[in-house]
Image (tube, rainbow, N blue to C red):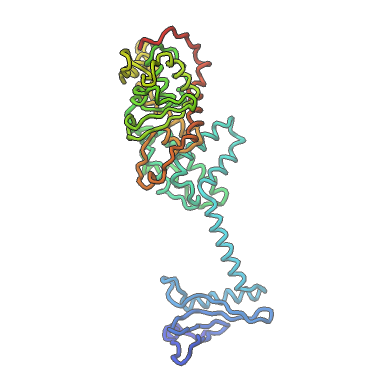
Amino acid sequence: MGKLTAVSVRAAKHPANSRRPVRLGDGGGLYLQVAPGDTKSWLLRYTLHGKAREMGLGPVGEPREGRIPLATARTLAGQARALLREGKDPLAERQAVRAARRQAEADAKQRTFKAAANALVDSKRAGWRNAKHGAQWRATLESYVYPTIGDMPVSAVGTDDVLRVLRPIWERVPETASRVRQRIEAVLDAARVKGWRTGENPARWKGHLAGELPPPRKVKRVEHRPALPWEQMGAFMAALAQREGIAALTLRFVILTAARTGEVRGMRWREVDLDGKLWVVPGERMKAGKMHRVPLSAAALEVLGEVRPLMFGADSLVFPGARKNVPLSDMALSEVVRRMNEGGEEGAAPRWRDSEGRVVVPHGFRSSFRDWAGEARPEGREVVERALAHTIKDKAEAAYARSDLLEKRRPLMQAWGEHCGRAAAEVVTLAVRRGRGAV
């Protein structure tokens, strides 16, 4: 035993007159094998059940180079001989370990963050009071999380990955972003319990992300236009339905289509396909300069039915101003909201305001729609962004995203219309309109 030394291993050369590898024994079945070109490796020879077998132990060299020195080779040989004494085949045992490692790696690839999230939502479903809670979980994850880390192995998700999800929305929608963080944390905790990951939770707030992000309650929204919380949309629409005049109807249509006010104010009847329940906005009236198709919900079609008597031709405005075929001003829509906030007790805060107490404005309802879609709908970020006619900033992504996902947007807009009208019967009895002329 121990015939070789570190010096003799380094000095070993392959003889020039041989084409076959040569072996220098160390004892106990361990050999230094030197191939042509002086390539060196360790070999263990042993006999099991009367059959001679050989098992390679790895290349010769320093550990820092991923190789095996003499001392380590002797340790590995000793471990193999211990298995032989137990009647086990060292080669078969190593193959089994490698197979198990490969299977574990394959399982890890299948155990994505999305798979872990779905498993958690399924396990929690029985404890939730209604199905909406689960739908909100799935919707926020689909919109904000899956595009970034959904396909990552849940075991590999780290702090940088969590921050890549949160930073783009932390200031834009802080309340939603805070819920997203909590849900990521819950998914990762559940994955650790299942044995799908180990270590600390990178989505933990206290003592971790709190050092990277400002507290949600102190974040000032980057979005300057005040937006009504989406949970109040039903009550707002019920109150709006009591307002008389073309401006109130225009605002209702703006909200129900999640469109920009300018797109609606310039809308003409030739753009509307009532049978196809579709509104096609020409590119010259779109912010991005590209044609945009808007699926019309039952609620939006109802508004069009109320203004249809004003139509005098295909080229006439759908929502005309005081002068024939002259668009309403943007101020007219703002005035509707301003008047809706009048009439309260003196000194009381306006009823229709955002989470910071600011009076809402017409354009802010697009943010209300975006937050609702992210919180309560399963369609996902791409469909919602198409509904808002947002431009894809990533040029590579934009090159492949040629579909406007119209059919996927139809149920989204129908659900939005239903959400906006859900509280109407409960909140207020609608007044009968007597005319449409006043603003």
Residue occupying image coordinates x 48% and y 77%: 71
Residue 73's place in the image compared with 280, above or below, is below
Residue situated in front as seen by the camera: 430 or 146? 430
Q: How many marks?
A: 0
Residue 44 pos. (x, y %) = 56, 79
Residue occupying image coordinates x 51% and y 31%: 411
Outermost residue, front side? 313
Residue 68 pos. (x, y %) = 47, 75
Residue 318's place in the image compared with 3, above or below, is above
Q: Is residue 195 left or right of residue 181?
A: right
Look at the image and tell me in which quarter the N terminus lies.
Answer: bottom right
Residue 391 pos. (x, y %) = 36, 38
Residue situated in front as seen by the camera: 273 or 83? 273
Residue 239's place in the image compared with 84, above or below, is above
Outermost residue, top side? 434
Could you tell me if residue 65 is visible in this image?
yes
Q: Is residue 435 left or right of residue 334?
A: right
Residue occupying image coordinates x 54% and y 32%: 133
Could you tell me if residue 349 is visible in this image?
no
Residue situated in front as seen by the camera: 274 or 83? 274
Residue occupying image coordinates x 43% and y 31%: 371
Look at the image and tell me in which quarter the C terminus lies.
Answer: top left
Q: Quadrant of residue 364?
A: top left
Outermost residue, right side? 49
Residue 348 pos. (x, y %) = 37, 14
Q: Quadrant of residue 13?
A: bottom left
Residue 27's place in the image compared with 386, above or below, is below
